[in-house]
Image (cartoon, helix red, strand yellow):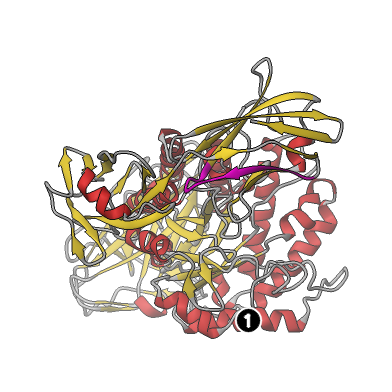
Amino acid sequence: MVRGARRRLGVVASGVAGLLVAGMMVAANAQAATGCRVAYAVSAQWPSGFTANVSVTNLGDPINGWALAWTFPSGQRVTQAWNAAVTSSGSQVTAANVSYNATIATNATVSFGFNGAWTGSNTAPTSFALNGVACTGEVGGTATPSGSLSPSVSPSMSPSVSPSTSPRPADPMATVAAMQPGWNLGNTLDAIPDETAWGNPLTTQAMLHYVRSQGYNSIRLPITWSNHHGPAPDYTIDAAWLARVRQIVDWSLAEGLYVMVNLHHDSWQWINAYPNDRTNVMNRYTALWTQIATAFRGHSAKLVFESINEPQFAGTSGDAESDQVVQELNTAFVRLVRRTGGDNATRLLVLPTLHTSGEQARLDALNATFNQLGDPNLAATVHFYGWWPFSVNIAGGTRYDSNVEQDLVGTFDRVHNTFVSRGIPVIIGEWALLSYDYTRPGIIERGEFLKYIEAVGHHARTRKLTTMLWDAGSFLHRTELRWRDQGIYEMMKASWSTRSGTASSDQVYVPRTGAITGKSLTLNLNGLSFQGLWQGSTSLTNGTDYTVSGSTLTLTPAALTRLVGNRAYGVNATIEARFSRGAPWQIGVITYDPPTQAAATGTTSAFTIPTQFRGDQLATMEAKYADGSPAGPANWTSFKEFWSNFQPDYAANTIILKPEFFAEVNDGAVTLTFHFWSGTQATYRITKSGTSVTGTT
């Protein structure tokens, strides 16, 4: 595995005349023409460690069984190797073939690699010998470098070659790339206390088959184990629970999915106590991962393990100390999984940052762990839920704007530059928006969410990041096996391979009365070309129904008059803009009048504002005291958090002010400003006195 390109060296060298390799005599065949060429390259170097790749080309007759010897000039040592069995004596090193690469035909090349340690300097070896013959780049080399092993051997030595204890890696970058895209079976095996406790149905083979049929290549199985094992000291996992986990893993693998399993809510249930209870927590952690790893050590390499979900800790002095705690747990995880043997010797293991954060300091801390471990079969993981004000709709964060874009690009650039550029793959193990939830409509406006989806797919794909959608039931209707919003799925699917065009809005508001005028939207072409507007299968006419000037799309008064029909409140028509590639952009044509509100009385635990929405929809709410300062929770902003502090009820024609809002409002007058998606603003005044509340327009 290549871990970057800070320093790259290449040499062609000569070597020793005869050698002893792992107890086996390897000598040049006196009857055969011999010769070899060696390319030695340091592909990555970091403080105290490096990765090297070695290619050996046989210039003589075919070889069946080989050993390459060299001496490190600066005292370096090999710490882990792949595709060769490596033994060392001081600075002298021998790499012998393993079972699958013993034969080297004439002019053929065999390659192996290793991680090494160095101090002072990392000078490349200058001479090599293959089966006792110096590698001079010509046939017949015989030179013996100083410090080479003696050509004579004891006849009593065993002819067997000791197997390498280092794991042979697959290709972690290729494995993680093959996992794209991924999907989380959220709020299921991680639910407390059992699989259906948080409202999702039992997982079925049919559901997993559907996920695979929709283009997903991997599935993350978040699993909470804390309620499913016995007491100390053994912490024996409940057999029925382990069998259920195995069943879902096996079903997923049978569908051709890569599978990632972890310790999930254990992170905050008991692992977070580690700083002040190291012995007990580590014993429990070790016991669980040893049992899990042992149970699955014979499973396909498509099964990967993730150490901890969103690690977090109590009792540390801050993030720097918590980073060290994560390193201890990640390091223990890798070592104990490797010790269980079988396919776990080479299984891909996934390590998180503290909080699975994409902050640079957190990434640097995880990078240090990778350098310390020197294991070629590791991947990094972070989670991404976007710019927080947009993700929860607070502080006026209603739109996919430059703040959201910069946060996305900055995070993905950091993980790419820290890991992917060094050959360490990255999995965005969870992504969505924090408050996107089909049971709480309106928090995230659909079109703004579509723009976010499109951008996440594009920026992840161009930075070679694998993404795994967090789905706790808001995207896939698991019982009916359909997407709750087909258009959202189509945008995600398109983003896996290309860009899609979007626009400044997916809504055009037309007043219910009065003259209808043209309405304009700005197209976000994203490098594509605009192909036209359609209503269903009918193509709208350029010049008559709409015009395009640069990136400005304008719907004509005639087209809007036809589309709104009798001008009933709400969406009267849906049209779509099509582009040269990607998903189409749907636009709702909406009839509205400015919303109206009425006076109300109530209490801090039950207060609603009568609101006739009249085809409009609520975007956000501001709250200010008489002096203009923000009122209510999050008093650093006048814009309150959608749903947590206020909530529209379109069926009841009310806006609900939540007890959580009043809990942080002082007695006296507060001015509320309601912002609607049409652009309308409505001002309302409430007065709080103890638990009593009155409101007037």
Mark 1 neighbour density, 10 Å: few (under 14) some (14–19) many (20 or more): some
What residue did someone put label 1 on? 246
613 left or right of 600 in image: left
Local SS, label 1: helix
Q: Quadrant of the N terminus?
A: bottom left
Residue 442, horizontal then vertical, whole percent = 54, 50
Q: Nearer the viewer, residue 543 or 407?
A: 543
The segment highlighted magenta reads: 606-618
Give whichever of 77, 306 is nearer the camera.
306
Picture quadrant of residue 6: top left
What residue sits 70% from the left and 79% below the top? 242
Residue 540, percent across and down? 18, 56
Q: How many marks?
A: 1
Reply above or below: 151 against 360.
below
* Outermost residue, left side: 543
Q: Position of residue 244 (x, y in %)?
A: 67, 82
Give the camera-side residue of 100 and 608.
608
Question: What's the amino acid at mark 1?
Answer: Arg
The question of residue 610 being in magenta is answered with yes
435 lies left or right of 428? right
User: Who's the residue at 45% across and 39% down the image?
Assistant: 399
Which one is nearer the viewer's eye here, 624 or 322?
A: 624
For residue 379, side relative to residue 579 (left or right): right
Going by the image, does 309 lie left or right of 526? Answer: right
**Residue in view at x 21 percent, y 39 percent:** 551
Quadrant of the image containing the C terminus:
top right
**Residue 261: x %, y % from top left:** 60, 68
Question: Does residue 536 show up magenta in the picture?
Answer: no
Instruction: State which quadrant residue 520 falls in.
Output: top left
